[in-house]
Amino acid sequence: MKLVEAGALLHDIGRSKTNTVDHGMIGAQIAQSEGLPEPVVNVIKRHVGGGITAEEAAGFGWPKDVYVPLSLEEKIVSYSDKLIDNHRKGRVSIDVEVDRLLANGHRDAAERVRKLHEEMTTLLGN
């Protein structure tokens, strides 16, 4: 629970430098430079878009690393992030995020978010 709480509070720390998809990777660099524990750094690094594949990360010019949520805590923060829409100022259905990704041509990311939704709702019993 403490890791989820820390990750939830810090996952967008990279937005202090950029509001692009890079905010997760940059946030992880900030957290690491501040000496935060690796599990917190990983939550920050892996929360974007339901995860960023190695191929996508290479296309962004990011350092080679894992940018897809692996642990339950990473998945919880990533999934929760998809349920909040900053433009609408509140909670939204996962379909809103999936539709936004599809509208922007991010079909693979939309599918990752859908799969993350299925995994989380299965765990929750919904």
Image (cartoon, rainbow, N blue to C red):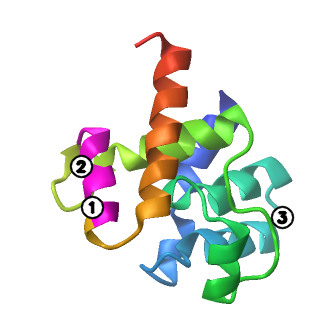
Determine the residue positioned at 52% across, 84% down.
Answer: 17
The C terminus appears in which quarter of the rendering? Answer: top left
Q: Which residue is mark 2?
A: 96
Q: Overall secondary structure of the magenta stretch?
A: helix
User: Hey, what amino acid is under mark 1?
Assistant: Arg
Q: In this rendering, which labeled residue sits more in front, label 2 or label 3?
A: 2
Quadrant position of residue 102: bottom left
How busy is the neighbourhood of tag 3: few (under 14 within 10 Å), some, or many (20 plus)? few
Left or right of 10? Residue 126 is: left
Which residue is the extreme one toward the left?
88
Determine the residue positioned at 61% across, 40% down.
Answer: 75
The N terminus appears in which quarter of the rendering? Answer: top right
Label 2 sits on a secondary structure element that is helix
Q: In this rendering, which labeled residue sits more in front, label 1 or label 3?
A: 1
- Looking at the image, which is closer to me, 6 or 84? 84
How busy is the neighbourhood of tag 1: few (under 14 within 10 Å), some, or many (20 plus)? some
Earlier residue among tags 2 and 3: 3
Q: Which residue is mark 1?
A: 100
Instruction: Reply yes or no: does residue 98 show up in magenta.
Output: yes
Above or below — where is 41 with respect to 60? Answer: above
**In the image, which residues are magenta?**
92-102
Q: Give the Cα separation between the discs numbered 2 and 1.
A: 6 Å
The x, y position of residue 3, in whole percent, is 69, 38
- Looking at the image, which is closer to me, 18 or 113? 113
Determine the residue positioned at 63% across, 86% down.
Answer: 59
Q: Which residue is mark 3?
A: 35
The x, y position of residue 71, in whole percent, is 74, 38
Earlier residue among tags 1 and 3: 3
Quadrant position of residue 32: bottom right
Label 3 sits on a secondary structure element that is loop
The x, y position of residue 70, in whole percent, is 73, 44
Q: Are marks 2 and 1 in contact (CB under 8 Å)?
A: yes
